[in-house]
Amino acid sequence: MAIAIPSIACLGVIGRNNNPLHVSVFPSYDPTTNSFAPLRTPLQFSLLLSSTLDVFEQRARQNAANATGLTGDYGLLHAIDERLASYGFETNTGVKFVVVVDMRGRRVDGAVLGGRAAGVGAVGLREGEMKPVFKAMQTAYVKLLQNPFYDPDEHSPPTGSGGKKIVSRKFAEDMRRIGESWTPGVTAL
Amino acid sequence: MEQPSSSSKVTVEYHDPHDVYKLLAPGLIPRLPLRDLHWQSHNGPVRSIQTLHVELVPAGNEQSSSGPSVTSPNPKPADRDDGFQTASIGGRPASTEQVEATAVAKTGAGAAGKERRHQIPGLRRTPYLKVLLVRCDDNDTYKATTRAEIRDWIKTHASSKPTSNAENHDAFEWLIVHVVIPNTTAATQPRLSGSKAAESSSDPAAKTAALRWRGGSSTLLEKLRNDFNGSSKSAVDRVRQIRIGINDVPYDILPRVVPAVPTGYHESGQDSINAWADLIGKFKELILSCFDTRVSQYEEDIKERDIQRSLPGWNFCTFFILKEGLARGFESVGLVEDALVGYDELSVGLDAIIQEQAITGNAEAHGGALLAHTEELKNIALKAIQQASLGSMDDEQAVDLQGGNQALVDNFHNIPINSSKKAYRELILANNVSLFDFRCYVFGRQISLLLRLGNASSSREELLAKLREQQELVPRGVAPATPMPARTDEAENLLHLAEICRRALQFVPAISTVARNDLMSSIMSADSQISVENPIAIEVVNNVVASFAFSVAQQILAQTSSKALPIPPSTLTVPDGHEPKAAIPEPKTMMHPARQSSLSLRSGQRPPPSPVGFPPGRTTEENTPFIRTGLEDLAAQRAELYSLSRNILEECGKKRGWSGGWAAVPMVGEPGVAEMDDISLDDDDPKANPLANLGTETSASMAGLNNELLRTALRAKDDFHRLYEILTDKALRHYAVASHAHSVQKSMADLAVLKFHLGQYSEASFFFYETIPSFGEAGWSLLELSMLLMFAKSLKELRKLDDYVNKALRQLLCKAAAAEKERIQQKSLLRIRASSKRQYPEPSSMSGLFTDLLHVSSSLGKEVKIPLVSLFCDVELDGPPVYDEMQDSFSVFLKLHCLIVDTFEATKISLRITSVSGSNQEIWLQTEAPITINPGKNKIRLRSMVMVAGSYEVDQIHLSSANVVLHHDRDIVQLDVTAPGTVKNHRVNLYQRAGALDARLIATKEVHLGRNNTLELEVLSGWNNIKSCEVKIRSVTGGVRLLMNEATVLGSIQPSKRPEGGVFAFGAFPAHTSILIKFPFSIENDLASVAVKAEVSFSTENGDFAFSRTSSVPITLALGVNVQDVFKHDKLFSRFTVSAASDSPLRLFKSELLGSDMFESQFGAPPSHPILIFTKQPASLLYKVQRKPGAKVNPKKKQTMHLRLYYSVVQEEIEALLGKTLAEELEQEGLLDYSALVVAKVVSLIDGALSSSELEKVALLGDLRTDFLSGVKWEKLFPGLGRMSAPAPGDGSPAAAIAHFMDSWLKRHPKLPLRHPDPSATQPKTIIIPVDIPPITIVHTADIQLQQPLLSMDTGAARAGGGYPTVCTNQVLPATLHLKWTRIWDTAVSDSTRLTVGAKSPTHVGGRSQDLEFGYEITAPPDTWLLGGRRKGHFVIPAMPNPDGDECLTSTPETEADIPLLLIPLREGWLPLPVVEIREATGNGGLESADSGPGDHHCEMDYRNLGETVHVIADRGEVTLSLDASGPGGGPLVLESERRLGLDGRVVA
C-alpha cells in the first residue's frame, strides 16, 4: 500500500533584515495525475515565507521575555492548511530558516517504509523531526559564510533594509539536497 | 494561580422520604454554588476552588428522565451535549443523548456498557455526598419511626463505606439534615438543650459536652447526633438541623396544631444564618474529604497501571479511562488546569502508543489495537464515492442527501469536535475506538477544558443558564432568600482562547492525516472494487478531509470568538455599491452554521461577526472591557485559523480551476538560484496511468464535501471568490489587531491579487499601493515585481494614466531592470566557473511595457524623467573619440546595456562632456537620427561638430523617446568610480588635428611700451572650404580689456560686415588660407599672461561646425632697460643698460635710438655679432643726444625719443627649433595629425626641464642637448587618442606610435644646433621703449682755469705727465673761474600753452620767463688749498625775453662770468682742484644745492674740473741736514735748503 509521507515543499532562508536570501521550492507528489508538481507558485511560497516573519518576531519576543529557547528552534510557525505547515529556526545572527513541509508530498510503498516514517504517517509530524533539517541548513549556511567571497553585509546590510540574495551555487545545491533527501525519521542530512 | 469563575459541578444526592426538599430548596439554592473551597492535595500546593456548583439529585429517580426531575429540568434544546459540560458514562440519562443512542446502537457495545461495571471504572458520576432530609416533628415520632428509618437509610446507602480499594473511586460521604417545620414541637425546641452560649455549632466539643450533661431532656438534634455520629473520637459530625421559617412554608403543608409545650425558644435570624452557614460548611468539608479519597485512589491506580505498561496485555484504553477518571475528577471540582494537564499527558501517551505500534507493527502487544477506520467516516466516504461514481450530481440530489442524513452529516461536520458526540468513553472502554475518534475525543476534551479556563462565553453562558434554571425552579410565590446572582460579565481569558486556537492549528494537520488514513483503510475494507488509487476515491477522501479540517477551524473560530477582541470593520465594505448582495450567500449562516444547535443561546446576544457591514453586536463594544492580555495572541491565532480555512478553500477551489488569482500572476524573472528544474522522480510515464485523464474530470466532485459553508462556496465560482475574500479579509483584520505586519501584508497581497483576478481594479490598485513598497523595501523583489506588474495593469485599466506611468510603470521598469542587472552580473560571475546552462525565465510578462510607457506618456502633459541607470547598465564609452577625415567633427561610441525587454526607438540621444580643467567648456554630442535600442547591448555613435581640444569627462546623458527622457547626470560628489550609476571609461581627450581649422593667438612681435599692446589671432582654415565663418573673440583673463574697436583684419580676406563687439563675420574662404586679426588690449594691472578665447563657428558643405580655443599668451617683457643721462652744455649722453627679465638669455641684434622732433642721437659703431645678454650680465648702450638745431620747444613737437631693440629670447628659439624639427619629422613618419599635439606637449616640458644655467649653456655653446626629454614616458602623455588608421609600431595606438617616434627621434638627435638666427630672414622681436629727455631748466658749466703761463718748474716735463701743471707748494696760482649756462635742455612746455603738464611744479614752468639768481661757492679742504679771490658770489641769469623764442638760450660772453681766483697749494701731491657748487639763491638769501631741492628749478651743473688735479711738489732745490739730534724735538736739523725757483714771494720756513 502506498502511503503518503511528508516531504519538504519549500526551504527558505531569510536574512536579518527580513529579506529573502534563498528560496527553494520542491515539487510534491500529486496522486491524481501521478506526477510531481509544486503545490504553490513560487510567489505564494515567497508570501508564505514573508508571513512567517511575524511569528519569528513573536517567538523571539517571548523567548527573550522568558529567557528560554536558546536553540532558536521555533517549531511550528504556521499550519498553512491541512497539508502544508511551516517550521522555523533562527540563528544567533538573526538569519531565519523556514521549512515548509508537505504532509503528503511523497508517496512511498508501505513495504519500503521505515518504521519512524510510518509513525509519522500515523500521528503527524513531531517538532523534533525538523531538527536535522535545520541543522543541515545551518551547516550549509556556515559553509557559505566561510567562503571568503561571501560578504554577509552585502546580503544583510547593517543599515537595516534590503540585501542581496545568496547566489552561491554550492549553497543552492546544499539546499536542494536537504530538501530532496529529507524524510521523516532521518536523523542526519 | 488564577482561578477562573468555576463552572464545575459535583453531584449531591439527596434522599427525601418526607418530601421536605421543596421547603429546604428556597433556602439552599441561593446559597449555592459553594464558594472558596481549599483543597490540599498530597503532592501539590493548596488549590483553591472559588466556586463549586452543586448538582442536587434526588435519589432513586435516576431511571426515568420523565420523572419529577428537579435538578435537570433543562429544556430539551440543551440536551445535546456539546463538549461544554462533562459527559457521563451511564448512570445518568438525565441528558438523554438520542444521537448517541443511535450511534451506539449500531455497535451494540454501548448499551452493555451502561449496565456493566467495568473492572476499571472511570470516574463515575456518583454523588460525592448523600444527604438524608429528615422531617421529624417531635421526639415521639423520632423514637417511633424516624430513628429506624434513618438507620435503614444508613444501612442501605451510607454504610457501604470503604470495603475495597476500588470502591474508593466512588467514595462518598453522607449527611443527615433535620428539617424542622414551624409549628411543630421540634420547632419549639432549642437547637441544643445546653446553654445558649454553647449553641455555637462550630464547636462540636461543646455540643457533646452539653449532650452529656443534659442527657435526659435532649433535643431532637442531640438525639440524632447521639445516635448517628458514631462514638469514636474521630467520628465526623454528620447531623445538621435547618429550621424553616414560617413564611417559607406553603400553607397546605404547615401544621395546624401548635404543640402544647412551648419552650419559649425562638429561632432568631442570626441563628438561622448560622445554621445555614454551618450546613454549607459541612457540605464543603464532606465533599472535599470525599474528593481527596477519590483522588488518592485514582492516583494509586494510575501508578500501578503505569508500571504494568510494558507487560503484555496492557491496554492503553483502560489506562486511558482510568487516568481520564482522575482528570474528570479534577474537572468536576473546578480544578480545570489539573484536568487539562491530565489530558495533555494522555494525548502524548496516545501518540507514543501509536508510534510504537507503527514501528513494531504489532498493535496488540502495545496497548491494544485501535480500529483502522471510523464508521461515520466510512459511511460518508462510501456514500460520496457512490454519488460521485453515479455521475453528475446536481444540487437537488445534494440537498436530498443531506436531508436524509441530516443528523449524521450535521453531527459530523458542523460540530466536528465534540467529546459527547458519541459515547466515546464507552467505545474506548470497549476497545472499540478508532484513532480518529480517539484523537477527536481527546482534543474535544482539551478544548472544552480550555474553554472553561478561558471563561469563554460559550461555556459560561451555558452554566449560568443552568444555574438560572435551578433557581427558577424554586416554588413560585416564595421570595428567594438571597437575590439571584447577577450575571457577571466576567472577563474572558484571552490567553486561554489563544491556546485553543494554537492547539487547533496543530491539531488540524495531524487529524487530517489521521482522517486520511482512516478513510483509506475504510474504503479498502469496505469495497475491494474501489481501489485506493481510484481518482474518485482520492477525490472523495480529499474532500472529506478538507471539509473536516475546514469545519474544525470554523468551530474553533466560533468557540473562541470574544467580544473583547476588537476587530476593525471590514475594509471590504467599501465596494459595496456594485456587488449584488443577493448573489452572496448569507454570510451569517454561512460562517457558523453550527450555531443553530448548541450555540443558539448566544445568538441573541452575540451574533457572529458579519463580514459585510458593521456587525450589530459591535454596538456594545464600548461597554466591553478592553483586555490587553493575550489580545494580540488571540487575534493572531484566530487569524491563522482564518488563513487555514482560506487555504483549504483555495486548495479545493484549485481543483475546480478557480483560484485566488495567484496562479495567473505573472512571474518576473528574478535573480537567484531558486529556480529548480523539475526532475521527475517517478519512473512511470504519465501516459501509462489511464486514470490521469479521468482524474481531472472528476476532480471537481463535490462528493464528500460535507461542510455546508464549504459546499456553498464551491458551488459557484462567485461564491468561492466571495468566501475566499471574506476569509482573507477576516484574517487580515485579525492580523492587524495582532500587529503582525508581515501577515497583514500577505493578506493584503492576497486580496489585491484576488481583486485583480476578478477585475476589480480600483480596489486591487488600492491594495497593491499599500503592499508593494513594504515588499520592495525588504527585498522581496520577486513578489514586488509581480505585484507591480499587476498594479500597472490595474491602473491602466482604470485609465489613471499619470499614476500608471509615474507610480507603476516607472517603478516596475526600474525594478525589473535592477533585477535584470543583477542577473547579468550574476551571469558574469558564473561565467568564470563551469559554463552554466541555467535558463532564466524569459521575462515575457515585461514585454510591451516600455513601449506602452512611451505610448501613454506621449499623452501626458509633461515629460517623464527616468534615471538612465535604472534602465540601463554598463554605460560606457567605447574607446577614444573617432575623428572624421577632412572634417572638424568627431564621434564617440556609447555602449549601453539595455535592461528593457522591448525594442524601442530613441528619438535622440545626447551626451555632454565637460572639461575637467575647471573651465566651463561643455560639448554636446548627439545622434544624427533616431536610433533603435535593442534589449541587451547597444552601441551608439554620438557625433559632435564642435571641436575644443582638451580633456573631458562625461557629464550628462539624455536619451529621449517620445515624452520619456532617460537622463543621467554625473554626481559631482561621486567619488567611487565603481559605484553603480557611473559611466565607465568616462574620460574623453580631444586634440587638435594638424589639418583642422585652427585659431592661434600670437602676441605681436612688436612691442611698443608707450602704446596698448596688441594680440594677433590667426584663423587657419585648414582643410575646410569655408562657406561662411564667424569668429568671436573674448578675453577670459580678468582685468583685460580687448579693444575690439581698434581691431584690424590683415590680409586679403576681409570681414563681410563690420565687426561688432568682437564678432567678425567672414564670407567664404578656401582651404589652407588664414585670416589674421590684430587687436590691441589694455590691462588694468600687471599680468603675466593674457588668455583669449576664440570661438569660430563656420559652415562647410559638410555642415555647421564650431571650434573654440582658449589660448594664453605671456605679456611680460623679456628684457629690462635702465637709462642714465649725463647733461653737457650742448649735448647729452644717455647710457642704456639692457638686462634679461627672465631666466632665459636674450640675443640683442640691433638697437637704435630714434630721434624725435627735438633731438637726434648718435651711436658708435654697432657690434658685428648679436650681443648675448645674460641674466647677470646686462648690455650697455651709449647714445649721444643733441638738440636738433633750430628746433624750438613746442608742444606740438615730440620730444620723446624711442629706443628700439631687436632681440630674441633663447628659450623661444629653443621652442621654435624643437617644434620645427619635430613637426618636420612627424610629417615624415605619417604622424602629421598629431604634430600640433606633440609639439605643444614637448614645448610644455621645456619650462620645467631647462634651468637658467642650462639655458645659458645652450646660448653659449650654440647647441641644445635633447637628453632632458629622454626620461619622459611618452605613451602616458597621450591618452585617449583613438586608433590609427595605418599600421603603427607598438600596440597600434597613436600614443605608442608617438612614443616610438619620440624615442627614436631622441636617439637620432642627441644635440640640436641652435644657430644664430638671421635677423634678416626671420623677423626678430622688437621692443620700442619711449625715452623721455628730462627737461632741465638751466645747465651750468663751471670751469677753473689756471692762468697761463704758469710759472712752472719744469713746464715741459710737468705737462707731459698728465696735462696738469706741476707747481710747488706755496706757489701762488692765479686762476679764473668761468661760469656759463644754457637753457637749451629746458624743454618743458610753458604753462601758457600746456597748463597740465607743468602742474607738478609751477615755478619750473615759469623758469624761462624770469630772472634766476644763483650763487656759487668754491670750497676746498683748508689744509690743501689756500683760496684767494671771491669764493662766494651771486649771479643772475636773465629771463628770456620770449620764452618760446630761441634767443638768450645760452649764455653769451656777456652773460658769462669770469671770476679771478688765487690758489695756493699747501701740500705736496696730486691735489684736486677746489670744488665749485652752484645753488639757486632762495628768497632768504641762502644758497641751495643746484641739483636738488623741492620747489627748485631743475638745474644741472657740469663741473669741468671734476677729477682734475694739480701736481704740487715741494719748492726745494737742495737740502742740507745735520744728522745729530740737534733739531727741534730731537729730529735732524735742517741746516740749509735751496729753493728751486727763485720766485718773488719767498716763504720763510
Image: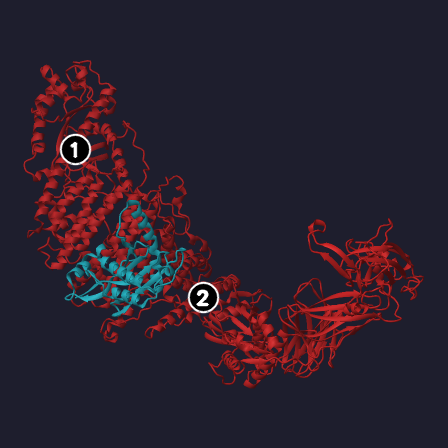
Chain colours: A cyan, B red
Question: Few, some or many C-alpha atoms within 10 Å of disc 2 (few <14, some 14-19, many ≥20)?
Answer: few
Q: Is residue B1464 above or below residue B850?
A: above
| Residue holding disc 2 | B978
Location of residue A42 (image quadrant) = bottom left
Q: Amino acid at mark 2?
A: Thr
* Residue B287, disc: 1
Which sits earlier in the primary sequence, circle 2 or circle 1?
1
Q: Nearer the viewer, residue A108 or B1044?
A: B1044
Give the image location of residue B1520, x and y in percent: 74, 58
Q: Nearer the viewer, residue B307 or A130?
A: A130
Location of residue B251 (image quadrant) = top left
Output the chain of dot 1. Answer: B
Q: Amino acid at mark 1?
A: Ile
Give the image location of residue B1211, x and y in percent: 62, 74
Q: Is residue B1062 above or below residue B461?
A: below
Give the image location of residue A185, x and y in percent: 19, 60
Quarter of the image containing the N terminus of chain B?
Answer: top left
The reply to whether residue B117 is visible in this rendering is no
